[in-house]
Amino acid sequence: MTVKAQIVEMMDFVPERELPIILEVVKRFIPSDIDDRMTEDDLNSHRRAMEEYRSGETVSHSEIDW
């Protein structure tokens, strides 16, 4: 299990009153100059694209007659 997966799994055991503290700690590791954040639509599009890639539904750039 990845470290990220372990952290996500452990969050269910953190008391609700402690979550704001953890949120502030996590925020400190996120660069302040990030101006492009992934939305839920972005994440869904990425998941769908990866599924298409894994199932062989994508076409490589070399196969396209640009």
Image (cartoon, rainbow, N blue to C red):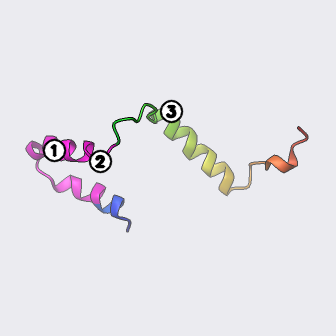
Reply yes or no: does residue 23 show up in magenta. Answer: yes
Residue in the image at 30% along x and 55% along y: 8
Reply yes or no: does residue 10 show up in magenta. Answer: yes
Check the image and name the residue furthest to the bottom.
1
Mark 1 neighbour density, 10 Å: few (under 14) some (14–19) many (20 or more): few
Q: Tell me the quarter of the image containing the C terminus.
A: top right
In primary-sequence order, the first of circles 2 and 1 is 1
Q: Mark 3 points at which residue?
A: 41
Q: Is residue 23 left or right of residue 56?
A: left
Residue 37 coordinates in the image, percent (x, y): 43, 34
Check the image and name the residue furthest to the right.
65
Q: In this view, does 4 lie to the left or right of 53?
A: left
Q: Which one is nearer the viewer's eye here, 66 or 42?
A: 66
Q: Give the range drawn in magenta.
A: 7-30
Residue in the image at 87% along x and 49% along y: 63
What is the distance, in whole Å, between disc 3 and disc 1 at their CAs? 26 Å
What is the distance, in whole Å, between disc 2 and disc 1 at their CAs? 16 Å
